[in-house]
Amino acid sequence: MGAGGLLLRPDLCYTLARVPPDLAIRRERLIGVYQTMLEVKDMECRIEENLTQCTCSYETCLRRGKCCECIRHHQEAGELPGCLFPPEAERTYDRSIAHFARIYSRR
């Protein structure tokens, strides 16, 4: 079990534990993304609405607006979706958990 009683991968639990307490908002957002992943099985995808809020700068991505697919893709790669990163970091296309931790440990 991980944060909030969620069943999380060991590497994610380790990463979440390393997020500094002053970054609790980002930590909670990360937990929220994984909570959403557990709940999306019965949800209807709202692609048009999602596209208006998608912050990913990879314009040709086939998963744009399909948040469930995007999250699943990045989880399988051991990464986080671009929407969790600030714009300047998102544009590097480094979606690694380590990159996320580095960015928010400096803030």
Image (tube, rainbow, N blue to C red):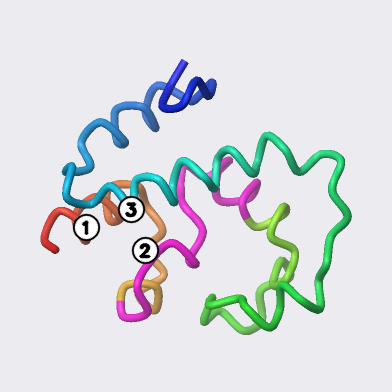
Whether tag 3 and tag 2 are in contact, CB under 8 A, the answer is no
Q: Which residue in the structure is indicated by mark 1? A: 104
Residue type indicated by callout 1: Tyr
Query: Label 3 crowding class (10 Å Cα cut-off): few <14, some 14-19, many 20+?
Result: few
Q: What residue appears at the point 23 percent right and 42 percent down from the top-left corner?
A: 19
Q: What residue appears at the point 58 percent right and 40 percent down from the top-left corner?
A: 76
Q: Nearer the viewer, mark 3 or mark 1?
A: 3
**Which element is circle 1 on?**
helix
Residue type indicated by callout 2: Asp
Image quarter of residue 14: top left
Q: Which residue in the structure is indicated by mark 3? A: 25
Left/right of residue 94 with respect to residue 40 in the rendered view: left
**Segment tinted magenta in the rendering:** 71-88
Q: Which residue in the structure is indicated by mark 2? A: 94
Q: Is residue 58 above or below residue 42?
A: below
Nearer-N-terminus badge (3/1): 3
